[in-house]
Each structure stands twice: as structure tokens, then as C-alpha cells.
Image (tube, helix red, strand yellow):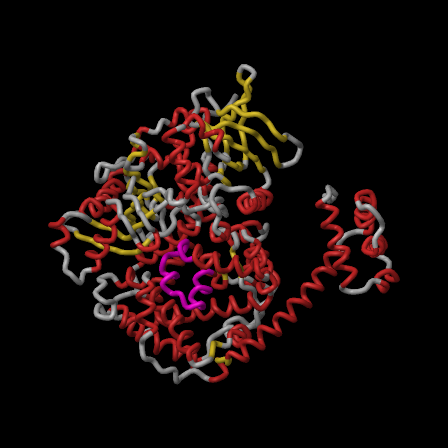
Amino acid sequence: MASNKKDNSNETNDELELFEFKKDLLNLVHVAADASGEFHEEKFFDDMSELLCEAGVYDDIQKDPYINSRRGIRIDGWNWNKTERILSAVITKFSNDEELVKISKAEIEKLGKQASRFILNINNSKFLESLDDSDPALELAKEMSSYLNDLGIDGEEGFRPAAHKFRVIVLTDHLLSERVKLGKLKIENIHDKETFFEIWDLKRIRNLSYSGAESEPCDVDFAELCDEGGLPTLPANISESDISSYICVMPGTVLRDLYDSFGQRLLESNVRTFLQFRGKVNQGMKSTLLQNPENFFAYNNGLTVTASAIELENKSGKLLIKKLDNMQIVNGGQTTSAIYFSPLSKGKQQGIDFRDIDLTKVYVQMKLTVIDNDEDSEIIKSNVARYANSQNAIQAADLISNHPLHREIEKQSRSLWAPPSEDMAVPTKWFYERARGQYQTKILAFRTPAKARTFQAENPKKQMFTKTDMAKYENTWRMRPWEVKLGAQGNLAKIGVVLIKEWDENPDNFGIMFFKDLVAKAILFKTTDTAILKSDWYKDGGGLKAETSTYTIALLLHKLDKSGHTLNLKRIWETQKLSESLLNQIIDLAKIVREKLLDIDFRNGHANPSMFARKREAWDRFKDLEYEINIINKNDLLTKKQEKNRQEENDALNEENAEIDIMNFCTEISDEEWAAIYEFLKQHLPKETKDMKTLNKFTQLSSPAMQRKLQYPFDYNTAKKLRAEAIDKGYVVPE
């Protein structure tokens, strides 16, 4: 007889995992907070904001705390999503308790009201008058209130439409009670506009942290969205492989509803910044939607979509897509945004109001590729986004997450051992997280604790860095600290354009020397950060560590550059530390930088130092500071000539390494495969050439005698070239 007793084993295991996760989380928060003298709740906010931004959940979260207990107002940070036109207020609830503490519906909703009240009051004259002119909250309120109305010209953004929606975000290390249904958590609309309420509790944070994905997946239920009980489709390529393709016609109303539910997450493998109808193409789409919606299908290039799994149903002879797991629009982001935002636009065209756009007449062709294999998924998304015809030119920064540049940095990080240091008696590695969660996934994949400990000893957690970390180090080195302060994603987008352009010009420049220099920049930044935290003048209050760090390093490099010098990154790599003289110089300069950031006169009247640091004006004022470098030892510096010589040496090394890579590549291919390539090309080339005779030698590559006859590197380059030509002509590489 079957037992009616409930099996609680899975629930218990989940609780144990959450308990261990929370212990690790609190440990990280405590260590960072104790070092900085900041409150634990502040560090929790910093860490969670970084996690959510790196995951692509939000573009950026600005830390700007304010509390007014009398009015019941509190805010810890905020976010402006210019693509979705959503203004968000962020608030934290931190238990600082190792036990799993639950939070009630009433507590959550109270927090939500405190944060929403700030947005409600940002254009309230009585509230603004109650704030002192020097109160950072005054500038914060003015900054946020600027998003309540349409702006004509706003710096580089051009026309900026007003906020379309609002969002209140709660970050907490509590557990949301099982009795609380997220859908039933309510918050009043702010300024009569739709307002979302998002809760990131311990469980949700744990799941995101361990997922290894770029964001929470967009799992779509077409059975609910479509009148027919699913999205009609035709199979285009169904095979036994991990990849299958389908052709669909997407109703405009369904696409609008999808974007309304998922927002940018739906487009995160594509272009992340919508061009707001400034381009001719987007203007054309907007006009078509208004004037000829029934012709949109004919005029538009359509969508290219990927998913990790599909659920199909044959209904009365019609094949329907019931569900898609992890749906991503990798080409067609502009189309999606145009369909969503056009009916929300103000104004008229030929006497017709844009708000009268009829999306029931709009259809869009959609090509769907379902990819079961995660690695294939990443590659295919990258290739589609980069090479498919798109209606707007895709910016290089939009592709940075999947760019080969990152694979190269990852490759170097997995193979290159750093020299021993004072606190590391043995060589270690600097682990580059190309995809978020890789480090933790590696640890969890080991079957024994001993192997996990070995991995952690070789790859210390403190030597792990991410794409956004890399962007921070690199852009600081290039003396663009105001861009660094745009936030993790904003800075990544800025430096991404530059790095990818440099990669396209010469990928060889991103080899071993680049990685060693990148690690040296990481050491420079991390050491500066720690030194500032431990300084007595920093502990006096005022914060601004992040601003002080990037501006200090950039200013030091600027002053050195004016004297014809730069820092010796090679020495930092070899010693895995900063010299005492260099560190003392940095601390001396950092104190001055922070004092200036706190000086409202230096800020030219800007009340909020953090916001001031995000402006190019801030860097221009710092560059004019009189400061003499007199502490740094000459061994820590290179002249511009020495640096040029170093680059030339690196070019020679890259050339040599490239030749070795080609040789290794060719020798890894079997005689049988070379023979197959040779026979294939014999049938597809007009005649036997000198190159083909060279290729024939590789059919006997395993023979030592033949290896001696091959001319290195010329013959190897020829063989590799012909193999690529064979693939272009249809040769199938064996698995």
C-alpha cells in the first residue's frame, strides 16, 4: 500500500543549501564591511547590485541612500532603464543572521511603500524645500524627477522620453514566506503609471548566483498568450542533432505582451540599447505601424529567435508551439521595441495619433532555432547577432559578452600561471569569469572536496575577476574614470566598443602580454581599493571609495604621461604586488582626490559627489590639479621608448606563438582526416596545384620522415588554409 507520508527530503536539502549559501554570503559581506568601516547592509547592497547588473537583470543600480523616518521615506539606490523607460527605486532589508529568517507580506509591502514614497515626492516642492542645499538627496531628487517628463535635448542621449513605468525593488537576505505569492504582492501605482514590485529574496539570489546564466531565463507560455492555444509554426530543419529550426508568424499583440512581461531580458543576446526612433529605419517602422500596419510583415526583416527547449502540440492538423524555454530575440530587437513603444509615443503623423496604432493588424515573420547544447547556443547567438542582416547597425559593445576576445582572455587565464607572491608561496592562476557563475560552477562540479580545494588553491577567489571588472581596470588605465562611474554595464559598453575595434584590427595584441598586463591592472586597482579602505582619512566618513580609486589611478597615469612615463606593468606582474614607493604615492594622491570630491566648490556646485564623478567635467577639473609625483621609485616606471620596445618584443612573441599554434593545430588532425580533405579538394578544384602537393604531404604527417620534409611554417600555413577552403566548399568535419 502506498504511503501518504510527505517526502520532505528535497525541501530539507534545499534548506541546507540555502543555509550554506547564506553563510558564505554573510562572510563575504562581513569581510568587506569590516575592512571599509562601512555598515554590513551597505556592503550587502553593493554585492547584490553588482550581481544583478552582471547578470543583465538591470543595466545599472546607483547607490544613493536617503532616509526620512518622519515621512516614512527610504531609498538605498535607483535605476533608470532608458530602453524600457522604467524608473526604479531600490531598498534593502538585511538580517545579518546566519539562520534562515523569513519575511512576511506586511514587511515586504511596508518596504515597498517607503521606497515608492521617495519617487512620489521627487517633484514635491514642499519636500524639496525641506532638504538643505548641501544635502545629496536634493540633487538625487532633481536627477530622478528629470525622468518624469519628456526632455528635448539631454546630452549625448538626444531626445529623452519620460518614464513609462515605475519599479520598486527589494533586496533582502530573508526568505520570502511560502505563503506569500509574488503575484499577490501589491504596490500602488506611482504618478498614475504602471508600477512593478520586484522581490529578490535569499532563494532567488541563490538561484541567480549559481545559475551561470546571463540572466533569469525567459520561459514563454504561448498557450496562454495566443488565441489558438499556441503559436502556429512550420518545421524548417528537424534533425537528430541538438539544433532544430522553425518558421512562425508572430502577431504584433503577442510580441508587445512578451516585451511587456520580460523587457530587455528578452533581447539580452541582441542589441541592449534601443535607438528611440532616431534612425531612419526606426522612423520608417513607426510610420508603417501608423499608416500601413497590414504591410508591416512585407516591409520588415522579421525576428531571429533562439530557445533552449520547445513544447509542441498537433492540434487539428496544425502544429503549435505551446512553450519555449529561455527565449531570446538575437536579431530583431529594433522591431520588437518599435512595436512596443510606437503606440506609447506622443504626437501625430498625417493627422493620426500614434496612440491609435492598431497592433491587431501587425504580424512579423520569425525564424526560431532551438539549441539543446549550451555551448552551441552561445556560439550561434553570437554569430547570428554579428553577421545576420539587421535593420540597424549593431554596435560592437552590444556583442562584447560573446566576443572571441573574451574566449582568448579565458584561455589565457586557464593556462597561465602567475609567479609566487608574498602571501602565495606557490604559483597560482587569475580566474577570468567569461560567463557569470563559472567559478562557482567549477567548484560544484568536482566530485570530491579534495579536488575542489585543489582548484581553489590554484585559483584563489580573490584572484577571480569578471567582464565588468576587466572593463573597470581597462578603462581606468585608459584614463576615463567618468565612464567607469557610469556603472558596471554602462562602462562595459563604453570600453567594449574600443576593445572590439582593437581586436578586429589585430587580435594578436590580446595574447599573453595583454593578459599579464590585465592582471597587473587588476592588482593595481584592487590594492588601491584596499589601501583606501584602510586609510585613517577614509574611515573618518564620507565614503566615495569607488570614485576615489578610479580617479586616483587615472590621475596618477595622467601626470606620469605628461612627464613621458607610464607604470611598469611587467614589474607588477612579476612581483604580484605594488612596491612600497608606488603604494605610498597612490595613498598620498588618493587622499587629495577624495578631499576634492568632498569639496562642493571643486565640484562646481554639484551637491552629489557620486553624480559629479559620472560627468566628463569631473575629469577635466582633476586633470588641472597641480600635483608633483616624487615618491615613486624609477623601477616602477617605464619611459615611452621603453614601453614601445616592450610592445615590439610582444609583437615578435605573438608572431612566434601564432606559428606554434598553427603547427599544433595541424599535428592534432589525423592522417585520415588530411587524406579526406585532400580527396575532397581534388574533386572541387580545377587542377592540381603546388599547394595541393603540399597538402598531400600531411596525409602522412605521423611519419617522422615526412615531418622532417615539411617546411615550417610555410607548409603548415598552406595546409590550414586549404582545410578552411574545403570547409567553405562543403567539407564536413568529422565529430
Q: Residue furthest right?
A: 705
Residue 179 is at least partly visible in this image: no
Residue 13 versus residue 599 in the image, above or below: above
Estimate the x, y position of residue 638 in percent, counting from the top left: 51, 80
Residue 477 versus residue 202 in the image, above or below: below
Q: Residue furthest front?
A: 350
Residue displayed at 45% across by 71% down: 524
Apparent side of residue 310 relative to residue 161 in the rendered image (left or right): right
Range drawn in magenta = 471-491
Residue displayed at 48% across by 44% down: 270
Apparent side of residue 339 relative to residue 598 in the rendered image (left or right): right
Q: Examine the image and state in which quarter residue 507 appears.
A: bottom right
Q: Residue furthest top?
A: 316
Residue 684 is at least partly visible in this image: yes
Which quadrant holds the C terminus? top right
Q: Examine the image and state in which quarter residue 665 appears.
A: bottom right
Q: Is residue 482 magenta?
A: yes
Residue displayed at 54% across by 33% down: 367
Estimate the x, y position of residue 52 in percent, counting from the top left: 40, 49
Estimate the x, y position of residue 375 in percent, counting from the top left: 59, 45
Estimate the x, y position of residue 557 in percent, counting from the top left: 42, 74
